[in-house]
Amino acid sequence: MKYPFLPLKSALFTLGLLLLAACDPANIDETSVTPEFDCENIGLNIGDECLTAAGTGIVDADCNCVLNVVYDCPELELNIGDACDNPAGGSGTVDANCDCVSTTTYDCPDISLNIGDPCSTGTGAMGTVDANCDCTLSNTFDCPNLGLNIGDDCVDILGVMGVVDANCDCVGNVTFDCPDLQLNIGDPCNNPAGGPGTVDANCDCVPTTTYDCPNINLNIGDPCSTGTGTMGTVDANCDCVDNITYDCPSLNLNVGDACMTFLGIMGVVSADCDCITNTPFDCPNLNLNVGDPCVAGPGETGIVDANCDCTVYDCPNLGLNIGDDCSTPLGGSGTVTADCGCE
């Protein structure tokens, strides 16, 4: 029996062998195609779309992904009408000037709050906005000046933790021998006279130094300042006496020093420690001349007479009394009349 398909089978078998030989890895060309990009670090070409944190952009010539969005307000990266956060922290809308203007109308625009809103006071306590747009304490405290209640924790002026007492004072939690001083017996202190001291058993601040003159916190012989402001020395009576020895201690001046008379005239201290003027007078004790007006007593005006006495005359202009002899204007003799004329 003949098989007509054998030649065909042989042909197909031969073809298969050829194909297998062709697919042998040793016969495959090892050349491969590697993709190339303008920007290999991002695997993109210039002009390709890319993605930024702010949105879709375009790869530029520097291989950077730049936004291809154009904003009305580039500094804000927003357009007119977009929602925004205004500087006061409230919500707003971008206006035509690229400003973020508030979309909310507040009772108190300076603080972007309404009356009744919670707020923080200047001391940091919580409060409420009042009708004057001030932040006032929202609670009624036992001690409004502290914003605290009696028994609340507090910090005293020395920075010590304490408790608010019934007097609204912040007293330390430390127990002192002398609470008024916030010190213990034996602690150093400043005594009322200003010197150093020590707290005694009576809670008084007593000087730690014993002075000869405790009323002035000085010892005998210490330098001091007199009542007139000059430097002196503490004497045995605890008085501050001037260190300078004067010829005239009552005046605190020496003989020959310039001085002021009781009449207000400049003079010189004499050897008798009197202040006499530099001009010689008929009556040095009065610093006046014979015939000068003088004060004889309260409300009485007189004339210095030849005896350097201040005499009160009926007619001071003449230095005479009514009835005294006088010289008339014509050179004759006369008598002083009641109207102080000479007839």
Image (cartoon, rainbow, N blue to C red):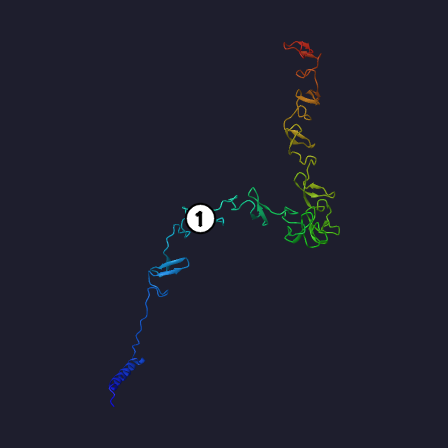
Q: Is residue 139 above or below residue 23?
A: above
State the residue in front, 104 or 128. Answer: 104
Question: Which quadrant: the C terminus?
Answer: top right
Work out which residue is located at the far front of the displayed protein and give it. Answer: 1
Horizontal side, residue 111 vs residue 219: left or right:
left
Mark 1 = which residue? 93
Indicate the position of residue 129 as horizontal and vertical percent values. Answer: 56, 45
Q: Residue at x 40, y 58 (%)?
A: 55
Q: Amino acid at mark 1?
A: Thr
- Quadrant of the image for the N terminus? bottom left
Residue 218 x %, y %: 70, 46
Identify the residue at the far right of this view.
Answer: 201
User: In the rendered picture of this protein, how many numbered marks are placed on residues?
Assistant: 1
> Relative to 90, is 27 on the left or the right?
left
Q: Residues within 10 Å of mark 1 (few under 14, many from 20)?
A: many
Query: Observer-nearest residue: 116 or 281?
Result: 116
Image coords of residue 77 (percent x, y): 41, 53
Asked if residue 29 is positioned above or below residue 309 in the image, the reply reads below
Q: Secondary structure at mark 1?
A: strand
Residue 30: x and y, percent?
31, 76
As drawn, 138 above or below 49:
above
